[in-house]
Each structure stands twice: as structure tokens, then as C-alpha cells.
Amino acid sequence: MTKIILKDIPDFDKIEVYEDNGGYTALRKALLEMTPDEVTEEVKRSNLRGRGGACFPTGLKWTFMPKGKDKPKYLCCNGDESEPGSFKDREIFEKNPHQFIEGVLLANYAMGIKTAYVYIRGEYYKWINILEEKLQEAYKKGYIGNNILGTGFSTDIYIHRGAGAYICGEESALMNSIEGKRGYPRVKPPFPAQNGLWGNPTTINNIETLANIPEIINNGGEWFSKIGEPKHPGTLLFGVSGHVNKPGVYELETGTPLIKIINEYCGGVTGGKDIKMVIPGGSSMPPLTKEEVMSVKMDNESLKAIGSSIGTAGVIVMNEDTDLVKILIKIAHFYYHESCGQCTPCREGTGWLLRMLKRIDEGKGRIEDLDLLINVSENIEGNTVCALGDAAAWPVKWTIRKFRSEFEKKIPASPVTPEVKNKVHSLRHSEEPVKN
Amino acid sequence: MFNQEELKEIENLKSRYETSQSALLPVLWMVQEKEGWISNDSIAKVAKVLDISYEHILGVVTFYTMFNKKKTGKIHLQICTNVSCTLRGGYELFKYISEKLGINNKETTEDGMFTIEEVECLGSCATAPMLQVNNKDYYENMSIEKADELIEHFKNHINEHLKQ
């Protein structure tokens, strides 16, 4: 198995060890032997796709940035990592921070950027301190700052600490948060490459995406493009949690079968139980049934083919005893709590979803509530400024579609009369708002 | 008011961004690290030093859940009960601590020692269940026994902990 980021080298987080094992050679190579466009070309050739969930080709994203020096340009490194089930970026900060830093420097060189901000969720106090220390080491060695390696290229990297808002992982909300505002997503277009931080061209990349760049420059884009699945090449940091014997972060090639990850790498389901449901990429991704888990490969194309998505590769495993109604309430509560409140479908809809699910859990549900939940989900989906609406809608819609009997079990039997079937649901019928 | 050293730090923070408003989150963090919460007086103080409106800052402080708008106990225990933690006993952990301390979600013990709060995913899913103390330290792979030990530890070593 190829490892690009979490290499088995002791003390790899230390700058000397990193340097002894080829660290910062990609930076040297790029600054001394390559033009910025050649760096971007290499990344394009690698077919590296963003690791934040959208899987957009990174090299192509970089080409959207305008050339020239008319306006300052910025890079935002997205380490907000707040999607439930995702905990991979902290592993990079802890185990291989310098490769990430080198990736930032290469991105800045390729796009002519003088300032990068690393946005890290506020709760990651420990990892913010770790990265700050590593940045200072790199400054002292002359890898960051003015006239890097004597080439005339200068760039700075700053950490910006978040303060507990999931929505700031959305790229335009992240920029507003850096600007000292509430984390409200912006309407797109204009896109960040035209109008980003303080109105200037900006690129936003995930931490894991950037950590891949140095090895792409060292070994060539073609080398990278041949690792794992050709349409979604490279490795992924799978964060596996829930009912498995060895939860943790595993760096594996894309296309690794999900059941192999669960059984071989994570030591199987705890207590030797059966699998009921698996969320493949963070809590917003449509969940998988046991049958799907048995055959799916973990790359974006394979998951898309069965109606889900790789997301942040945060795998949550649930055994046969799991109460899916209770789990879905947790998920629905999360998105209700984290909705920024800008768009009505999301702000109101997430509350309706939560209240209806609670009603079902309390044994007061009606059989028509299941279709109503799907109906509300579909009225949130696609009708909001950002993807939080979709993130709230998908798990509800797909958990009910795939595991309907789990919900029906909690609904008291009542005859389904034509009146019930044709009932026009007034959404004003929702119960008291839930207490937070 | 901010002292000279703090003012210098604020100038340093401002220099990292295009606008002084952008230094708002880091400056609010400075205030909360020192005072434990963000009072209306602090907001007025920050408004002055960054030259932005009081109302804007109030809007920001109330948007981000990590900024405390009320004083908390000396030890603020935030227990994750999101999906991965719940699957491994996170909710039971919260309930146990809540009953042990005799307080509900977001309440503080009478002696002002502990505040408990049920929180969303803290990105520690492989080491669930877990809790966070004072917006900083993670305590992972928790159990009921470990929770007992931790609470005893804080009761006996509160001053050492707060000095950190």
C-alpha cells in the first residue's frame, strides 16, 4: 500500500527528520527549476481531487486564479473539519505538519500568492499550537517569509482560529469568518477565484489536498495518477469510527473495498455483530445498507454509482443493534443546530425534520410522517445558498428510503384511510420548538 | 482596558489582514482566554480598539458557539453526544456526569466549580467517547471510571489546572 501522507517514519513531524527524508526538496525543485505554471500543470496531470468532499480537480481550480499582480491573491487552507465522523486533518497536523506546510508554499508559488490563512476549528486548540510551532520552525529555516531559499519568492502563512461554527467549513462562510464576520455563506457567483477574501482572488483547498502536493512535485503527476482508482487517484485518510474494534485514521488507496477497511484494517465489527448501516463519508452522506457495504469500493465514482458520495472519507459503522431513529435524530439535531439561519428552507426545514423524528421516536408518529419527512427534505435540497441544506436533507431522506421498516416499527398502527393519504399537510402543525 | 502588551499583540494581529475587523475573532479569543467569557463591557472595549461597531461584535459573539456569553464554572465540561460518540457511550457519559454533579445541560454547580454542556462533534470520533475541558483540552477514550477520576482530579487540583 502506497502511503503519501501518514508515512511510517518515527518523529516525521520534526523538521530535521522531515528534511532528512526528502522534506522541502519539492519546494526547492519548484522554486529553482520550475515556473509557477509548470507546478500547476504537474498538479493537473496528477488528477488530484479535493479532499474536502466535493472532489473538484485541484489543478483546474488553481487555473481559475487570475494571473498578474494587479490585486493581492490569497489561499485559504480549510482545516475546519467539523463534519461529524471526520478527524483526519488533526492527524496531518500531528504526524506530518511540514508536508502540509510545504504544500501550502507550493500552492502559493503556483498561483502567485503572498499570504495563506490556515483556518482551523476552534476546538483544535492542541493542534493549532502544534501547527504554530511547526510554522515558526519553518520560518526560522527560511522556508516561509521573505526571499525563500534566496529565490526572491516571499510568502506568509497565518493560522486563523475558528470558534465553533460548522458552517465555516463552507468556503465562502470561511472567508467571511476570516473577515471578522458571522459565518454566512455567500451567494455564488461570483466565485472566490474572482471575488474572495476582501474582494480579491482567493483559492480554498482542504488540508489533506495540500499535503499531497509535495509528493506530486517530487514524483510527478503521472506517478500520482496511477495510484488507486484512475478517476479519483491517490490515497485517502479514512477516519473510521463507531462499532469497529480498531477505530482510527487509515491511509489507504482510493478504491479499497469498504468491507476490507472494516474487517481487515479495523478488526471487524465490535462483539462480532452484524452491520446494519454505514455512513461512508461524514454524517451528511447518504448511508449504505449492509448489502452495499459488502460490495462497494471507496472512491467517489464507485459511491456515486450507488447514490452516495465519498465526502470526507469519515466512515461511521453501526451494528445490528443500533436504533437508527435515535441516530437520525442526532444527525438532524446537528444540522438544525448548525444551520446559519440565512435561508428559510434550511433554517425552518431542519427544525421540522428534527421535531418529526422526535415525534416518531416518542411513539407519537403517523405513518404519513415518513413521506412528509422525505417531502420536507426534498424541499430543502437545492433550495439554499450553500450545501448545508443538502447535508441536512440527504441523511434523512436516504435513511428513511433505505431503512423504512426501522421507522415504521416505532409508529403506532393506524388504518391508512384515503383521508390520511390525501391529507394536505399544513406545516404550521409542527409541535413546540425543541429546547436546545 | 487592554494593557500595553495586549495592544501590541492586537496591532500584530491586525497586520496579518487587510482590514482591522478581520482581527476580531483572534481578539475575542484573547479576551475569553483572559476573562473566561465575553461580557458586554469587553465587547465595547473590543469595538473601540478595532474601530468597529458594538452591534457587529455582538452579532459575531452570538453566532459562534465557543464564545461564552455567560460566565461558566471554573471547569467547563463539554461532552460530545454526536453520532460516533453516542455509538460508543457518549450520551451515557453525559448523563452520568450530569447526575453525579446534580446539574442539567448548560448549568453550573452551586459552588461555581463545574459547568456541563452537551456538544456536537469535536472531531475525536476514533477515541470516543470524549469530552473537552475549558475549550482546550481533550480527554479521549473516556469511561465512567475515568470520569470519576477526572472530576476528583479537578476538585483536588483546581488551582494547578487553572494556572496552565
Image (cartoon, grey):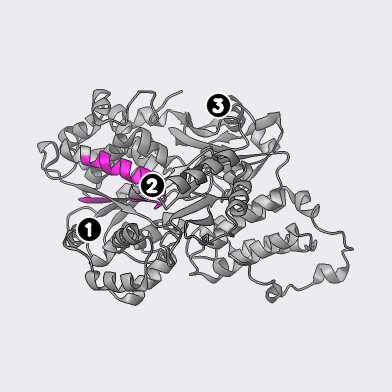
Task: Give the residue at mark 3.
Answer: A265
**Magenta residues, as a range?**
A114-136
How many angstroms separate mark 1 from mark 3 (CA)?
Answer: 44 Å
Decide: few, some or many residues near mark 1? Use Cα within 10 Å; few <14, some 14-19, many ≥20.
Answer: some
The secondary element bearing badge 3 is classed as helix
The secondary element bearing badge 2 is classed as helix
Query: Residue B109 got which mark?
Result: none
Question: What is the x, y in percent for residue A110?
Answer: 24, 43
Question: What is the x, y in percent for residue B136?
Answer: 40, 49
Quarter placement of the C terminus of chain A: bottom right
Mark 1 — on which chain does it sit?
A: B
Query: Residue B161 got which mark?
Result: 2
For the residue marked with disc 2, what is the amino acid?
Answer: His
For the residue marked with disc 3, what is the amino acid?
Answer: Tyr
| Residue A191 as seen in the image, left or right of residue B132 | left
Q: Which residue is drawn at 57% across and 59% down?
A: B105
Q: Residue at x 52, y 65 (%)?
A: A384
Task: Give the residue at mark 1.
Answer: B13
